């Protein structure tokens, strides 16, 4: 097995059993954008195409979590992330696990490919941030991991009631399509 094969195998691992009606906050953007269709739901994603890049972001997140835990920062992160189940409608839920959760705020970190505007929120990230805000009711930040830095650049997210309603409507419709299959 090559090193790349090992990375891909790690990303493809089947740690989570998929259930109709249950979604991850991190996949809402792909559902909203039509990149995941009901007939494709639960199949391996194109994340594998960018395996090394995905793992680079994961490595930065893991290292920062280790640092915070080692020096006693009061933060739920790393293997101590809090998990929230957000009810969208009867029988439809979203699971969200903020990367770094402090007493009064959360950080959702990203290491984006082909994005270097670290002062604004990449539109596709808004969906996950909205879900995390709804689940925690805490001030929510997008943390960009920029090249050669371990401390993310933070951009505050502004909750959006219209976006939340769009997410709920789309998931209800998407789930109905899943149930037909």
Image (tube, grey):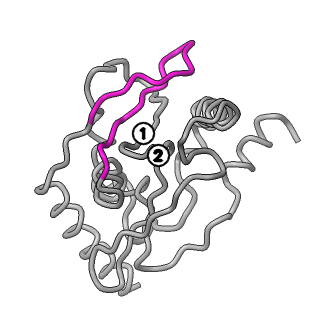
Q: In this rendering, is residue 169 above or below 103?
A: below
Direction from residue 118 to residue 73 in the image, left or right: right
Q: Quadrant of residue 172?
A: bottom left
SS at badge 2:
strand
Q: Residue furthest right?
A: 1
Q: CA distance from mark 2 to mark 1?
A: 6 Å
| Res. 137 in view | yes
Asked whether 52 or 152 is in front, the reply is: 152
Residue at horizontal 51 percent and vertical 78 percent from the top: 19
Direction from residue 34 to residue 106 in the image, left or right: right
Q: Please tell me whether residue 155 belongs to the stretch shown in magenta.
A: yes
Going from the N terminus, do you reach mark 2 or mark 1 first? 2
Circle 1 crowding by C-alpha within 10 Å: few under 14, some 14–19, many from 20: many
Residue at horizontal 35 percent and vertical 53 percent from the top: 132
Direction from residue 4 to residue 144 in the image, left or right: left
Q: Quadrant of residue 180?
A: bottom left
Q: Position of residue 81 (x, y in %)?
A: 56, 52
Q: Quadrant of residue 173?
A: bottom left
| Res. 52 in view | no
Quarter holding the N terminus is top right
Q: Position of residue 112 (x, y in %)?
A: 45, 29
Pointer 2 and pointer 1: residues touching (CB < 8 Å)?
Answer: yes
SS at badge 1:
strand
Judging by the rendered image, the residue that carries numbered circle 2 is: 101
Quarter holding the C terminus is bottom left
Q: Please tell me whether residue 163 belongs to the stretch shown in magenta.
A: no
Q: Position of residue 47 (x, y in %)?
A: 55, 45
Span highlighted in magenta in the image: 138-156
Direction from residue 37 to residue 55 in the image, left or right: right
Q: Residue furthest top?
A: 148
Judging by the rendered image, the residue that carries numbered circle 1 is: 107
Q: Position of residue 83 (x, y in %)?
A: 51, 62
């Amino acid at each position: 097995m090559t090193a790349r094969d090992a990375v891909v195998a790690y990303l493809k691992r089947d740690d989570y059993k998929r259930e109709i009606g249950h979604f991850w906050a991190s996949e809402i953007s792909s559902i909203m954008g039509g990149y995941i269709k009901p007939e494709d739901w639960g199949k391996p994603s194109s994340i594998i195409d960018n395996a090394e890049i995905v793992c680079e972001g994961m490595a930065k997140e893991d290292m920062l979590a280790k640092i915070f835990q080692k020096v006693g920062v009061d933060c739920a992160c790393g293997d101590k992330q809090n998990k929230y189940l957000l009810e969208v409608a009867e029988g439809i839920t979203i699971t969200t696990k903020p990367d770094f959760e402090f007493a009064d705020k959360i950080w959702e970190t990203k290491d984006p490919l082909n994005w270097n505007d670290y002062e604004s929120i990449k539109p596709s990230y808004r969906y996950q941030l909205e879900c995390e805000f709804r689940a925690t009711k805490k001030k929510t930040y997008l943390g960009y991991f920029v090249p050669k830095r371990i401390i993310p650049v933070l951009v505050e997210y502004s909750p959006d009631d219209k976006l939340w309603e769009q997410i709920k409507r789309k998931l209800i419709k998407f789930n109905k399509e899943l149930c037909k299959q």
